[in-house]
Image (cartoon, helix red, strand yellow):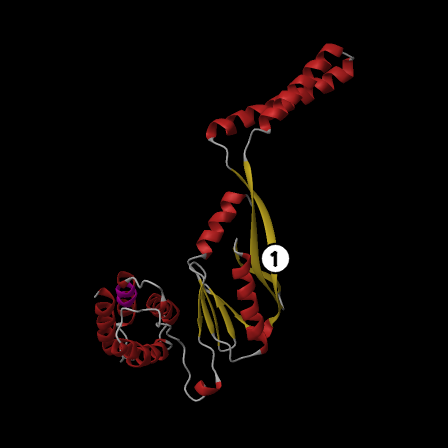
Amino acid sequence: MGYEEFAQEVELSKHRTLRIEDGILQYGNTTYPLRNISHVKIIQKELEENKSGWFIKLLAFIGGILVILGLIVLLVACSDGSGGAGVVSVVLIIIGGWIVSLQKKETHIFYGLAIETNSGSNELFFSEDEQFIKRVRDILSKALANSDVRTTIHIGDKNFIDNSVTNNQAEHHTHYNFNIEHHEGLSKEEKEFLLHDFKESVEKLYEELGSIKESQVTREQLDEIVKEINSEKPDVGKIKRAYEKIKSATEAYDTISSLGEFGKMVGQTVIMFMS
């Protein structure tokens, strides 16, 4: 696989989420029971990107043809003992090789996360950020040894949401943590609303979403809402769109009783971040 194709795969992975929860590793639409993972490792791939313009690429193509022609002429010269043809072949090879060398190439190093399972090695995703991959590896390795580890990782923006169960949370399971202290524009009351009423509504909806077939899609949208609220500059447009997707996917289910209440709180949250 060349650089361009591999870079596209890396770009696609940025739209995926890695979730560790309840003994399961979920990456995109694929799940792996943690008990089946024996080892987590980092792998490395080195690829060259051709950064030459179309004209240089055309010249390089022509240079390659000259090298081939030079080799053919050299073979003919060697067979019939023609010294002149031998000189011509050497000149063609040198000129062709020089033209090919005009191409500008840049080396890219990608670091990937791979897991060893009963069925063999599985490559999850790659990034040019080695420290990011190391952090994901460390969290996953910790999860293999500690079932209380619950983490959601958004690959694209490298956002880590730690939902691990602590001793204080043992009696009340939580799926989301809200980190909002950096929102200096919010009042104390507004922060209390997000940390208590809104969080409670999110947790309740999360549990109810587990009963429908669209649970993965809708929970990912719930992740998106929490991610935006925790971000430096929440995008209210993304929050509203994520809510609309949840609403569209769940409105046919009678089991989702908390959606109305959650919708009101989303509206209040959007107003808070717009003011």
- In screen coordinates, is 132 left or right of 40? left
The residue wearing badge 1 is 43
Give the percent coordinates (x, y) of residue 13.
46, 56
Give the percent coordinates (x, y) of residue 88.
68, 14
Residue 235 placement: quadrant: bottom left
Q: Does 242 lie within the magenta span? A: yes
Q: Secondary structure at mark 1?
A: strand
Please tell me which residue lies in front, 51 or 32.
Answer: 51
Residue 203 seen by the camera: yes
Residue stretch rendered in magenta on the structure: 239-244
* Number of numbered markers: 1
- In screen coordinates, is 220 left or right of 120? left
Please tell me which residue lies in front, 248 or 161.
Answer: 161
Please tell me which residue lies in front, 51 or 82.
Answer: 51
Q: Quadrant of the C terminus?
A: bottom left
The crowding category of the residue bearing disc 1, from other C-alpha atoms within 10 Å (few below 14, some 14 to 19, many at least 20), is: few
Residue 123 placement: quadrant: bottom right
Identify the residue shown where x is 53% and y is 25%: 59
Give the percent coordinates (x, y) of residue 58.
51, 26
Q: Quadrant of the N terminus?
A: top right
Residue 256 seen by the camera: no
Is 201 rendered above or below residue 229? below
Judged by its main secondary structure, the magenta piece is helix
